[in-house]
Image (tube, rainbow, N blue to C red):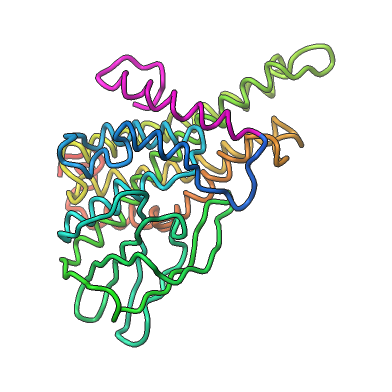
Amino acid sequence: MFATDTADDYTDLRQLVDDIGRRSFDARIGTRRVPDQFDDELWGNLSDTGLTRLTSDPDLGAGPNELAVVLSGIARYAGAVPLAETDALAGWLGREAGLDLPDGPLTVAIAEHSGDGPVKAVDVPWARAAAAVLLAVRTPDGARIGITSNPQVVDGHNAAGEPRGRVTVDLGAVTLASVDDAVLTELTLRGAWCRAVQIVGALDTAAAMTVRHTAEREQFGRSLSKFQAVQHALAGMAGEIERARAAASLAVAAAADYGFAAPRTEFAITAARVTAGRAVTAVTTSAHQLHGAIGVTAEHPLWSVTLRAQAWADEFGTTAGYARRLGRLALESANPWDLVIGNV
């Protein structure tokens, strides 16, 4: 599904994304710092080719398969832009609520509100860089959606340096539209789906960097890749990534066939998040072990993908949380085997 050399209906799209991502990645080697900065050039290239609103623009006729190619491809190159937030989350949410969205990058702030005081949302991606923040809030009167273009933002960042701010919004200054509670449930599932796809892309790059490093680095007169222990570690990384890729591919196919709100898709996304989350620890640990001390330096690009994968595994729900959710889905099913094979 995500390999750049795969020949299928998405070959041209995959190659386009790979070219755009690679140029951005090469231009930023040795310059990345924490916190990370919004990549205006990358965003401009993605916007010019229509990739920033790929699925949220109905005229383009794209769906989850195309979106997965783009998200994974940009994640391979640690793109510093809110692509998932703009298209899969804010773009879709704005359509559901009938809102007119501005051009430029967007993000979503998800919060609970008791009815007193301003709304406060934490860990909002790219809030400072966004042209607008879509507020998705659960209130005692139901789910509400609104656009705020000038929220109060306290800057923060995740482990990879991606901006994750604390947003405060005065509800009196925002026009809110009522939506069904199921919309916010789907919003979280969509976010989890995006992160599973992006994790696979980031782990692909971590593995590729590690294979190249162990082939080039020599010890005791031969390359590291000639040592059996290193070969076992590389094989273990590949196995973990392919397991995560298979689960993510199932989630992509389910979303394309049934939509994000379908029970089959919920199960597939839950399984993908568990599998991808468990792969993150194994793959990133092996990658840094095999790189040695150089892999943790600010100048080396390895951390830009490994730390992203680690941070993404805890967004829109944790791996442990999805594992418990997967167990509940199985226990609640009349026939757990039917659930596993998708016959529900």
Q: Is residue 309 visible?
A: yes
Tell me residue 322's x, y (percent): 38, 54
| Magenta-tinted stretch | 1-29
In the displayed structure image, the side of residue 311 where residue 103 appears, left or right:
left
Dividing the picture into quadrants, the one containing residue 48 is: top left
Q: Residue at x 65, y 39 (%)?
A: 31
Instruction: Judge left or right: residue 12 versus residue 283.
Output: left
Q: Nearer the viewer, residue 37 or 12?
A: 37
Foreground pick, 125 / 302: 125
Q: On the rendered structure, is 289 left or right of 181?
A: right
Residue at point 58% right, 51% down?
A: 161
- As for residue 116 lying within the magenta part, the answer is no
> Residue 344 placed where, x, y %?
15, 45
In the image, 115 versus 286, the foreground residue is: 115
Residue found at the very far right of the displayed protein: 220
Quadrant location of residue 11?
A: top left
Of the 4 image quadrants, the one containing the N terminus is top left
- Whether residue 17 is in magenta: the answer is yes
Residue sticking out furthest to the bottom: 116
Q: Is residue 118 left or right of residue 75?
A: left
Main secondary structure along the magenta-highlighted residues: helix
- In the rendered image, residue 114, in percent from the top left (x then y), is placed at 32, 83
